[in-house]
Amino acid sequence: MTTIAELAAAEHDRLLELIRELVAAESPSDDPAALEACAAIVARHLREAGAQVARHGTHVTGHWPGRAAGVLLLGHFDTVWPVGQIRRQPIDTRDGRLFGPGVLDMKAGLSIAIAAMRVLCAGGGADSRPSVTLLATSDEEVGSGTSRALIEQLARQSDAVLVFEPALPGGGLKTARKGVGEFTVTATGVSSHAGGQPELGASAITEIAHQVLALQGHADTARGLSVNVGVIHGGTRSNVVAESARAVVDVRIARLEDASAIEKKLRGLAARDPRVTLTVTGGINRPPMERTAGVERLFRLAQSVASEMGQVLTEGSTGGASDGNFSAALGVPTLDGLGALGDGPHAIHEHVIIKDLVPRVALAAGLIARLGDTGIK
């Protein structure tokens, strides 16, 4: 009987071709035409893998009927790179690595998920695997505004969610992720001539400077709570007391219970200068993925599958977020980082390690099969 590992090995060349095809189809989150073209490629490959395909705008689902247990595979094909980046960052193979914009984050991961389903379909019929749905979204890099409801709908119908974002260094899976929030603090003061009548002005820039220091003070490293003012805009000219200024603030939380507290603190900011008005907008837009008992059981199951294949599987956490944050917040056991090994997400040297691709296909296929056999135990 052909093993899952052997079936995965047979996917090697086809897998590399798919990754190259998806990377060549540049698909920035803000380019509808490019997203549509890439979505069509994803849909075609899902059909070729035996899935029942549906379109939801530029999001794509593929469904393989099976046993009652439901498994949701999550991935995205939008990237942070503009169309044309591929001329500066061409698809290239060297030193055992495949380079290209979006290859690690996360077109290789999406390809691994599709290849895993091809392996399972090749290994037997629907009676030998769980019911599986793969969701490929087109707006993860910009907050998943149009896909979140669909992600949550499908997650509620699933017993487990597997996310094919890049692995941790060394191949570790992600069993915890921080939640993410973005806030904008806007100060509105009073303009005046900086040389002739500075006393008549109320500087919005000065106010924002005070608020930046106050904001940084809300960070709590021990709780995994970070507050970073990453962007500041303000003023018009050096000889004008600034009437307006704003700061854009990134917030990361490791615990859902911290969300309301940090939001309350930011919305409660008070201006030091009574002539200045502060306005705070934004909020926590991705809940944290916490390492629950269900997540731990799912990881132990993956670890057992990996061990049987001669792989050593570790786990860890990361400060970044993914669409898995949404499913985890619903209480659905979620395991992240099942995608490719490599380096340079969002960077000019972005690449995946070729020799590690097939083992990830085997791991994913084996885990999905095991979930159909035993569920999460």
Image (spheres, helix red, strand yellow):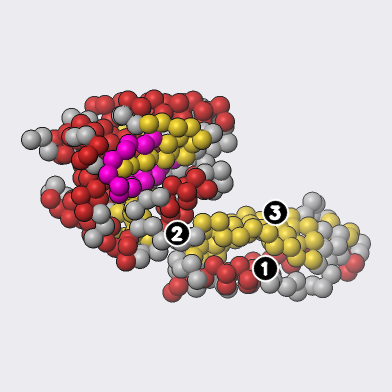
Q: Nearer the viewer, residue 203 or 322?
A: 322
Q: Nearer the viewer, residue 244 or 175?
A: 175
Q: Was residue 275 drawn as part of the magenta stretch in this picture?
A: no
In this rendering, position of residue 45 left or right of residue 80: left
* Dominant secondary structure (helix, strand or loop) of the stretch shown in magenta: strand
Badge 3 density bin: few <14, some 14–19, many ≥20, Cα 10 Å: few
Q: Which residues are magenta?
A: 62-76
Q: Was residue 63 drawn as part of the magenta stretch in this picture?
A: yes
Residue 127 locus on image (x, y percent): 22, 39
Q: Nearer the viewer, residue 86 or 27?
A: 27
Instruction: Give above or below for 117 relative to 176.
Output: above
- Which residue position is annotated with label 2? 330
- Which residue position is annotated with label 3? 233
Residue at the image position 73 percent from the left and 60 percent from the top: 186
Which dot, 2 or 1, sits closer to the camera? Answer: 2
Quadrant in which the N terminus appears: top left
Instruction: Give above or below for 101 relative to 296.
Output: above
Residue 276 locus on image (x, y percent): 81, 67
Instruction: Give above or below for 217 relative to 376.
Output: below
Q: Which amino acid does the dot numbered 1 rest on?
A: Arg
Residue at the image position 44 percent from the left and 74 percent from the top: 222
- Which residue position is annotated with label 1? 267
Q: Which mark is residue 33?
A: none
Decide which of tag 3 and tag 2 comes sooner along the chain. Answer: 3
Q: Which amino acid does the dot numbered 3 rest on?
A: His
Q: Which amino acid does the dot numbered 2 rest on?
A: Leu
